[in-house]
Amino acid sequence: MIEVEIVNQPEKAHELARVLAAVWGGADPIPADVIIAIIHSGGYASLASQIVNGKTQFIGGSLALVGNHQRKLHSHVTGVIDAATNSGVGRALKDHQWLWAKENNFSAISWTFDPLVRRNAHFNLVVLGAKVIEYSQNHYGAIDDLINAGDQTDRLVVERQVEGLTAAPSSRVYVAEQDDLIIHTPDDIVALRSTDREKAHRLRLDQRNSFESAFANAFHVQGLTRDGSFVLTKRRMH
């Protein structure tokens, strides 16, 4: 059974820092003192755990900051250790975050994800029902960790609605229509980055050109197909 708890003590902040380091590799991507500062400034921090052989094992975590307009929460990072992927931990963390945002009168939650990572696209757009609001080129600068491997960090910015809903949203896979634009995702960009960084970077540039050209021509992301391709439709001009 997965348990998600709010982080509100220094020792749990250190546990969260260790979990995030295990997910991304290397030194703590977010030190415990920064986590504590975010908590004390009104932000959100949580840990996911399960009991293994009678002992509590921390398997994931999430951290979000308070936005500066319209009472929006910005989820900076949510991660799950490799041993616990595809077991519902990510969904448990994001739904816990949604409920916390609801209880604290936030209107929506925003975050970013790498549009080259197919499994993340499915999780964010289909499982969580988030809506794409922006494409951001090299959002964080180059990050040389286990997941990004030094590549440029283009991101889709998404929002999950909170205000006006009684339950956390979800969506469905989308079936493209004749006039829709399709932007494909590679099978496993994270694995490719570990074997062929040049090819991975070319895919980054190709996808960037596709998204930026589409957005410049009034297309928006409608959803994701079953095979993990983005479907974009043209906005109607009134």
Image (cartoon, helix red, strand yellow):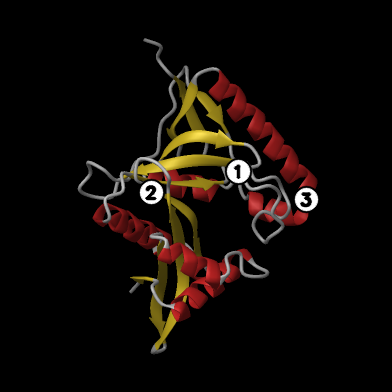
Find residue 13 and report its horizontal and vertical position in percent.
Answer: 47, 74
Find residue 44 and report its horizontal and vertical position in percent.
Answer: 40, 61
Q: Is residue 178 left or right of residue 195?
A: left
Q: Which mark is residue 116?
A: 1
At x 63% / y 37%, what residue is drawn? 137
Q: Amino acid at mark 3?
A: Asp
Q: Earlier in the sequence, mark 2 or mark 1?
A: 1
Q: Is residue 34 visible?
A: yes
Q: Which mark is residue 169?
A: none
Find residue 66 and report its horizontal and vertical position in percent.
Answer: 41, 52
Find residue 101 and report its horizontal and vertical position in percent.
Answer: 31, 54
Report crowding for label 3: few under 14, some 14 to 19, many 20 or more residues within 10 A (C-alpha).
few
Query: Quick one: quadrant of the C terminus?
Result: top left
Report crowding for label 1: few under 14, some 14 to 19, many 20 or more residues within 10 A (C-alpha).
many
Residue 158: quadrant of the picture: top left
Q: Amino acid at mark 1?
A: Leu
Q: Is residue 214 left or right of residue 106?
A: right
Please, what secondary structure does the residue beneath circle 3 have? Answer: loop
Query: Quick one: quadrant of the N terminus?
Result: bottom left
Q: Earlier in the sequence, mark 2 or mark 3?
A: 2
Judging by the rendered image, the residue that carries numbered circle 3 is: 196
Judging by the rendered image, the residue that carries numbered circle 2 is: 127
At x 28% / y 57%, what residue is drawn? 99
